[in-house]
Image (cartoon, helix red, strand yellow):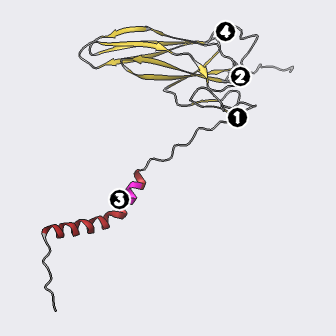
């Protein structure tokens, strides 16, 4: 007994077209997904120098110690390099694009190294102006971050290798905290060498 083939409905035709299209697109979708997938983020590893490592650090940001004059600052928005006895000024420009006043609070956190065996570094970081201020509408306001490395005790306890300390400059009401890394070098790092002329040495 012969059966008369049924005429496909518009829904059947549309479903078959969709299934065939997806089958054809599968290789392209797979390739696109693989290309668009974010690369694996490498994990921070502790690099040691003369027993120096960042294992067991309290600070969440890693440092690397590759030599007496070569420290690597990681995960920082700003990095400055200085020696004990120097004073640095880093200007920040706060942009208020609102057409009304914007209250902002400027703050400075404590600065400390991430490396538990880092040498002690006395550092003072302040901001001027500090505390609460009001940004005028459609304005640019300069805030100076002042980093001071006192000379106190430099002769008795000279720094023998570079040390990186980290802290945050907060601009509550304006933007997220700014992570500042200060790389403190021993006095003889990157020194200008002067050869005495003449004989007798």
Looking at the image, is mark 2 or mark 1 earlier in the sequence? 1
Q: Which residue is mark 4?
A: 151
Q: Which mark is residue 48?
A: 1
- At mark 2, the secondary structure is loop
Q: Which residue is mark 3?
A: 29
Q: Is residue 26 left or right of residue 73?
A: left
Given contact means CB atoms under 8 Å apart, are the residues at marks 3 and 4 in contact?
no
3 or 1: mark nearer the eye: 3
**What's the CA distance linking mark 2 and mark 3?**
61 Å
* Residue extent of the magenta highlight: 28-33
186 in relation to 35, above or below: above
How would you rate the neighbour count of disc 2 (Cα within 10 Å): few for under 14, some for 14-19, many for 20 or more?
few
Q: Closest to the observer: 51 or 16?
A: 16
1 or 4: mark nearer the eye: 1
Given contact means CB atoms under 8 Å apart, are the residues at marks 2 and 3 in contact?
no
- At mark 4, the secondary structure is loop
143 in relation to 42, above or below: above
Which SS type dominates the magenta stretch? helix
Q: Looking at the image, which residue sits at the far front?
A: 1
3 or 4: mark nearer the eye: 3
Coordinates of residue 127 in the picture (x, y in percent):
48, 11
- At mark 3, the secondary structure is helix
Quadrant of the frame with the C terminus: top right
Coordinates of residue 148 in the picture (x, y in percent):
58, 11
């Amino acid at each position: 007994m012969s059966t008369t083939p049924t005429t496909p409905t518009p829904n059947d035709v549309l479903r078959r077209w969709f299934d065939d299209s997806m089958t054809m697109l599968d290789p392209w979708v797979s390739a696109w997904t693989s290309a668009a997938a974010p690369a694996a983020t490498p994990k921070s590893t502790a690099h040691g120098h003369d027993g120096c490592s960042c294992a067991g650090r309290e600070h969440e940001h890693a440092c690397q110690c590759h030599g007496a004059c070569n420290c690597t600052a990681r995960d920082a928005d700003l990095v400055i390099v200085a020696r004990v006895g120097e004073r640095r000024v880093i200007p920040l420009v706060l942009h208020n694009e609102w057409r009304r006043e914007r209250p902002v609070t400027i703050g400075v956190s404590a600065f400390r190294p991430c490396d538990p065996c880092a040498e002690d570094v006395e550092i003072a970081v302040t901001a001027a102006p500090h505390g609460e201020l009001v940004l005028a509408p459609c304005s640019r306001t300069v805030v100076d971050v002042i980093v001071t490395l006192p000379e106190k005790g430099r002769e008795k306890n000279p720094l023998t290798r570079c040390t990186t300390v980290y802290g945050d400059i907060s601009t509550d009401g304006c933007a997220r905290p700014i992570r500042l890394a200060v790389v403190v070098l021993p006095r003889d790092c990157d020194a200008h060498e002067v050869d005495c002329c003449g004989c007798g040495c």
